[in-house]
Image: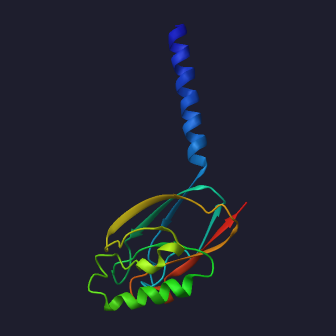
Amino acid sequence: MKHTRLLITTLAALSLSAFAQDADVATIELKPHAQNPLGYDKTELSVKAGQKVKLTLNNTGSIAPQPHNFLLVKPGKLDAVGALANAMLADPQGMAKSYIPEAAKPDLLANTKLVQPNQTETIEFTAPAEEGDYPYLCTFPGHWLLMKGVMHVTK
């Protein structure tokens, strides 16, 4: 009987510990907008500085299925990264590189690869330690002009 109580107490403690750890993770699902295939369904995300983030890019439900990706970049770098992405249209290896410009990598904080229609990809990363507004975008050529948003990082 004592062993059973000890086992139940231990399992309960482990469950609560796992729940507490999961509560510290920001779980985010991002999809193409249902009516606007060149937009995300969420243009604002909020996380805490230094928080673990589990982001799933779910490329389903669009009226015009297309490949998409997700890039989180440093503040003030949206236009520069978008211009580099557009330039990749001339790169015969653009698709193989998931349209992630090599020159943008110093400004890149997290990203998925190119996710094909009716596919998903989940990434895990740590939110920036500094508060601020961090832009995110899809860098498939031309998409970034409409398919973008802001991740608000707060203390």
Percent of width and height locating residue 130 = 68, 64
Vertical comparison of 155 with 132: above or below: above
Q: Kindly identify the residue that appears in the image at 39 percent across and 83 percent down.
A: 140
Count numbered badges in the picture: 0
Q: Is residue 44 above or below residue 130?
A: below
Residue in view at x 56 percent, y 78 percent = 149
How far across and down, in percent of the image, does residue 101 sit? 41, 80
Q: Tell me if residue 2 comes above or below residue 40 in the rendering.
A: above
Scheme of image coloration: rainbow
Name the one closer to the observer, 112 or 58.
112
Q: Give left or right: position of 84 versus 67.
A: right
> For the point 66% across and 66% down, which residue is it?
153
Q: Locate the C terminus by quadrant.
A: bottom right
Instruction: Identify the residue at the far right of this view.
Output: 155
Query: Is residue 142 visible in this depiction of the protein?
Result: no
Task: Give percent across and percent down for residue 61.
Answer: 38, 74
Residue nearer the viewer, 4 or 13: 13
The residue lying furthest to the left in this view is 92
Of residue 101 and residue 135, the one placed in the foreground of this image is 101
Which residue is drawn at the image coordinates 45% and 87% (left, top)?
84
Q: Position of residue 4 (x, y in %)?
A: 50, 13
In the image shown, does 63 or 45 lie closer to the viewer?
A: 45
| Residue 134 visible (yes or no) | yes
Q: Is residue 72 left or right of residue 139?
A: right
The image quadrant of residue 152 is bottom right
